[in-house]
Image (cartoon, rainbow, N blue to C red):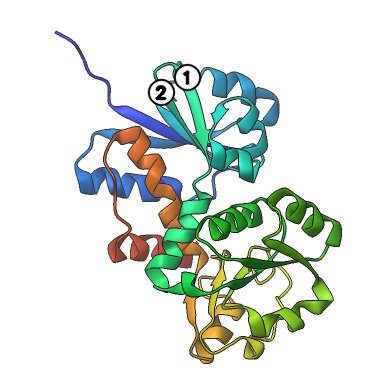
Amino acid sequence: MTETKARAACLIGWPAAHSRSPLIHHHWLRTLGIEGGYSIEAVPPEFLAEFVLRLSAHGFVGANITIPHKERALALTKPDARARAVGAANTLWYEGRELHSTNTDIEGFINNLDACASGWDATEEALVLGAGGSSRAVVFGLIERGVKIIHLANRTAERARALADQFGANVHPVAWDDIDEALPRAGLMVNTTSLGMRGQPGLEVNVGRLPSHAVVADLVYVPLETPLLAAAKTRGLKTADGLGMLLHQAVRGFELWFHRRPEVTSELRALVEADLTNA
């Protein structure tokens, strides 16, 4: 008689205790009636390679990767085109004995936009603030969906130019002080910086200069409604928040590990919102 062990995945980070990923995945496991598990594994950088390379021996069929391990995980696995383009991996899974990796921030961002602002991709120009790992995921997704011109502004101009060099002619670096000039042409504006996050400086952007059909997205989800999103809503603009992206980016990992595709529902969002509010 063969004993079938329940499948389990984990989140690998240092630190990682703040993550809402266990809440999300345990909700889906319960909802879909799957016997499985999802845990947090706090792994310091010096032990990352051993842990990842022996992931199955530790009892896991896959994993999420969070800071500061996303770039290192890329080199320890077989990355797909998305992970290579972003330069970071956030989801690992096995195909046979080979450990693969991808970056689901791209589809998390795009699928959240589709859910919150249907038709957003009719725009030809977007403005993206920030040039870090999240920005690379956003830019990749926008190019993939056919946005022709992406104005990219970063407080360190060299990083914006480097990202533009990576992605080619679609991306136009913009000096941080020149953001106002790009706003009237942007049918989509995306904040990928930490500005506006609780405990961080505010983001000083005049959303009044955006066109009336513009969509505003903010990857920050603490607070749930950032000052940027509040200002956009006051103007009557469509918005997409960081919590929606967090939920949507988790879908593919769950499907890869547990072989069922979960849904991002209002019930799940309310569950995570309540947890964030009570934190």
Q: Residue at x 23, y 37 (%)?
A: 34
Which of the 4 quarters of the picture holds residue 180?
A: bottom right
Residue 94, placed above or below residue 149: above
Residue at (57, 26) in percent of width and height:
77
Residue drawn at (41%, 41%), measured in percent from left and top? 253
Specify the quadrant of the image occupied by residue 252. top left
Can residue 14 be seen by looking at this rendering? Answer: no
Q: Which residue is mark 2?
A: 95
Residue 103 x %, y %: 53, 43
Contact (Cβ within 8 Å) of mark 2 with mark 1: yes
Residue name at image x 61 percent, y 58 percent: 139
Q: Quadrant of the N terminus?
A: top left
Residue situated in front as seen by the camera: 172 or 238: 172
Q: Residue furthest top?
A: 1
Left or right of 223 in this view: 21: left
Q: Is residue 24 above or below residue 191?
A: above
Tell me the distance, in whole angstroms, between the alpha carbons under discs 2 and 1.
5 Å
Q: Label 2: few (<14), some or many (≥20) within 10 Å? A: few
Q: Position of residue 63 (x, y in %)?
A: 47, 34
Tell me the residue that label 1 is attached to: 98
Question: Position of 84 compared to 109: left or right?
Answer: right
Q: Is residue 229 above or below residue 194?
A: below
Q: Nearer the viewer, residue 144 or 95?
A: 144
Q: Is residue 32 at all visible to an observer of this figure?
A: yes
x and y percentages locating residue 18 in the rendered image: 54, 50
Q: Amino acid at mark 1?
A: Glu
Find numbered disc 1 in the image and state the secondary structure of the residue it sits on.
strand
Q: How dense is the environment of label 1, judged by Cα within 10 Å: few (below 14), some, or many (20 and up)?
A: few
Q: Tag 2: residue type?
A: Glu
Residue closest to the eye, 214 or 51: 214
